[in-house]
């Protein structure tokens, strides 16, 4: 037993079990996380944010392909909680996905232990609270899945690893925001853009994020848009962003001066400190396609030899309303076909462009509208209603009437309605999904349990002829894709992972108003390799299954929520790259 590396959050322990036998190889890592409110002032106004073990953003879950994660999550909030591990595929194990269709929420004052394997995947992802609009108050943190030692990474080992969360931010609490969303007023524009929970660099002495670096070195920047509504453009003054990875796909390495990052998306860039470094440089996240939001998020890149603050205007954004630029940039992302990812064989050896499509879904989202007296938003005319009993549990316990396996393959010409309608997925089918955005803002679609190939996007209405424009060779596989307003995006996905999987619009107001659904994928045969895990022993029961729930010994208030302890040695190195508060007026 030994303490796990990142000592900034050394409240976790790692045990490398070296049991002999079939299960021996993959290590187990154990974590204890307490989720609670903290007080912080991201935009100068004191407010409640959601932190984990006293940190906001939360600790980085830093693991390696095939490790087993045992994560005891204590809910110290005053409302139910579920953490979801965005981009983690939970092979055969949707029980651990942390969304309302698979899990009963963890009641306030209870703990629940997630147990999942990060099977056959690598890359940069993040976790966040999936219900009750809580992501608007934080609760998110990075997930890094490293390559196993025997699988080479397609670039030299960087000198440091920096995780950045860029996001829109509201000074209102998530509870108030959720009321706004339910009302006719809807969600207002955010109060600002934050980077790792800090407001923008300004000369007035308010705290801002600082990344400390050494001249000449190269760092891997993992950048996540953890916001709730706003697409952001990310850039660093005078520095190139060499794109290397996005949500688990190693990409063709190309330099960009800026990158549009949409809600829920994650990117890795290598950034070389090739400037003189005599002063600091701006790190900028500015709102895209949203002229109502004036302020940008600004952090600072500080070389160790820096003599003074960043100066000059912020680096230029792309032309504000140019969605063509943004779409072309998205199309320029390519999979590196010759690099292996999680397995020794190169990832491009899966020739997705030659596989016969078994099912086609066209999914259309529309702006919110009044349905049955309430403001709701639909996908193919259906606004998802989360039942009190999670779909996955209802399926397992043969409880009928909780959901219907009747989600339409195309929009139907009928009145919009509120319903619990699920896609009956074909196990091992190869599915084409076209997302058609009939709303006025960019939407991010996300699928749990899988990575999909983003093969095409264009403006206008998708037609059968649109297929001729698909990238059938080297599209990136990811779990979150943007769909521009008045445009479509097409993805291909192989349904080889049995389970009940959430498909949603990641923009929080859309999700909250019903723009989600589930995809049920059942293996009809009993087959040890691909059959699903059975219900976890510690499952929480709710809804029609509440009688099965034993009360937790007692409700606990996990007070003193384990503030992170700073430990030396490797911690020093890590701290160098961590964002630090700098209130020194320079
Ligand atoms: C993640 O853990 C690995 C060891 O497994 C370590 O080499 C690496 O520095 C850690 N990365 C971060 C960002 O903490
Ligand atoms: C736990 O205690 C803290 C402070 O005493 C309080 O703010 C918090 O609301 C409590 N949490 C629960 C779940 O009762
Ligand atoms: C809650 O945590 C305790 C240990 O602190 C653990 O034994 C128990 O299994 C956890 N409960 C659940 C439901 O995971
Ligand atoms: C693709 O991956 C290979 C193998 O790891 C690497 O050598 C090469 O530099 C990468 N190519 C590009 C264009 O990024
Ligand atoms: C990217 O830009 C850096 C300079 O910042 C340069 O050294 C490197 O060769 C460029 N790489 C590619 C693939 O264009
Ligand atoms: C549910 O039904 C299936 C087959 O219809 C059966 O094998 C299974 O045991 C049932 N499960 C429960 C919990 O009753
Ligand atoms: C779902 O699909 C399976 C085949 O994949 C089929 O056997 C079953 O009848 C379908 N269920 C419904 C309710 O359509």
Image (cartoon, rainbow, N blue to C red):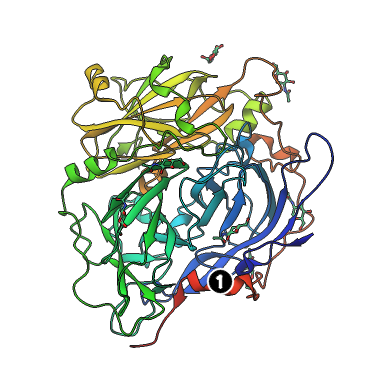
Q: Quadrant of ligand 5?
A: bottom left
Q: How far across and how far down the image is residue 382, in percent?
A: 38, 29
Q: How far across and how far down the image is residue 315, in percent?
A: 21, 65
* Residue 25 in the image: above or below residue 415: below
Which residue is outermost to the right?
Answer: 20
Q: Residue at x 21, y 26 (%)?
A: 461
Q: How many marks?
A: 1
Would residue 290 be seen by someone viewing this image from the given angle? yes
* Residue 196 in the image: above or below residue 227: below
Which residue is outermost to the bottom?
Answer: 585
**What element does badge 1 sit on?**
helix
Q: Residue at x 38, y 65 (%)?
A: 195
Q: How far across and how far down the image is residue 365, in percent?
A: 31, 34
* Disc 1 packing (10 Å; few <14; some 14–19; many ≥20): few
Q: Quadrant of the C terminus?
A: bottom left
Would residue 374 be seen by someone viewing this image from the given angle? no
Residue under label 1: 573
In the image shown, does 363 or 282 lie closer to the viewer? 282
Quadrant housing residue 531:
top right
Q: How far across and how far down the image is residue 526, in percent?
A: 70, 17
Quadrant housing residue 583:
bottom left
Q: Quadrant of the N terminus?
A: bottom right
| Lateral position of residue 461 relative to residue 411, left or right | left
Q: Residue at x 52, y 39 (%)?
A: 341
| Lateral position of residue 65 relative to residue 204, left or right | right
Does mark 1's beta carbon lie closer than 8 Å to ligand 1?
no
């Amino acid at each position: 037993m030994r303490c796990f590396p990142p000592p900034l959050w050394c409240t976790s322990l790692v045990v490398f079990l070296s049991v002999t036998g079939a299960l021996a190889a993959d290590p187990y890592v154990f974590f204890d996380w307490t989720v609670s409110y903290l007080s912080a002032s991201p935009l100068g106004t004191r407010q409640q944010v959601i932190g984990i073990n006293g940190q906001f953003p939360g600790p980085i879950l830093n693991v390696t392909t095939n490790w087993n994660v045992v994560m005891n999550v204590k809910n110290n909030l005053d409302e139910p909680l579920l953490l979801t591990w965005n981009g983690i595929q939970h092979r055969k194990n949707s029980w651990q996905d942390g969304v309302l269709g698979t899990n009963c929420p963890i009641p306030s004052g209870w703990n629940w232990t997630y147990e999942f394997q990060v099977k056959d995947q690598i890359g940069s992802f993040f976790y966040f609270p999936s219900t009750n609009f809580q992501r608007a108050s934080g609760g998110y943190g990075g997930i890094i899945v490293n390559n196993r030692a025997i699988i080479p990474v397609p670039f030299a080992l960087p000198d440091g690893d920096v995780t950045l969360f860029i996001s829109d931010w509201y000074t209102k609490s998530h509870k108030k925001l959720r009321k706004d969303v339910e009302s006719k007023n809807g969600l207002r524009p955010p109060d600002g853009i934050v980077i790792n929970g800090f407001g923008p660099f300004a000369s007035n002495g308010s705290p801002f994020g600082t990344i400390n670096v050494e001249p000449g070195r190269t760092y891997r920047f993992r950048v996540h848009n953890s916001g709730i509504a706003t697409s952001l453009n990310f850039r660093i003054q005078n520095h190139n962003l060499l794109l290397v990875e996005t949500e688990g796909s190693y990409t063709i390495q190309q330099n960009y001066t800026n990158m549009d990052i949409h809600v829920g998306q994650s990117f890795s860039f290598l950034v070389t400190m090739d400037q003189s470094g005599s002063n600091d440089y701006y790190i900028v996240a500015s709102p895209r396609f949203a002229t109502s939001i004036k302020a940008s998020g600004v952090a600072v890149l500080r070389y160790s030899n820096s003599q003074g603050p960043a100066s000059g205007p912020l680096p230029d954004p792309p032309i504000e309303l140019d969605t063509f630029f943004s779409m072309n940039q998205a199309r320029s992302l390519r999979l590196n076909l010759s690099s292996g990812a999680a397995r020794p064989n190169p990832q491009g050896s899966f020739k997705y462009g030659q596989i016969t499509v078994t099912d086609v879904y066209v999914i259309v989202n529309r702006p919110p509208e009044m349905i049955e007296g309430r403001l709701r938003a639909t996908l193919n005319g259906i606004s998802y209603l989360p039942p009190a009993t999670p779909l996955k549990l209802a399926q397992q316990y043969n409880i009928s009437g909780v959901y219907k396996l009747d989600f339409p393959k195309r929009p139907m010409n009928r009145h919009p309605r509120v319903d619990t309608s699920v896609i009956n997925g074909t196990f091992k089918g190869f599915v084409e999904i076209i997302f058609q955005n009939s709303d006025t803002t960019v939407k991010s679609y996300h699928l749990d349990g899988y990575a999909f190939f983003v093969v095409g996007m264009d403006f206008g209405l998708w037609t059968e002829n649109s297929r001729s424009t698909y990238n059938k060779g080297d599209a990136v596989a990811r779990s979150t894709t943007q769909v521009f307003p008045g445009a479509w995006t097409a993805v291909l996905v192989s349904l080889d992972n049995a389970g009940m999987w959430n498909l949603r619009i990641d923009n929080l107001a859309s999700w909250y108003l019903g723009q989600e659904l589930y995809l049920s994928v059942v293996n009809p045969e009993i087959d040890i390799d691909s059959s699903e895990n059975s219900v976890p022993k510690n499952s929480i029961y709710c809804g029609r299954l509440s009688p099965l729930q034993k009360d937790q010994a007692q409700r606990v208030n996990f007070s003193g929520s384990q503030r992170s302890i700073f430990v030396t040695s490797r911690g020093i190195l890590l701290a160098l790259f961590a964002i630090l508060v700098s209130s020194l007026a320079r």
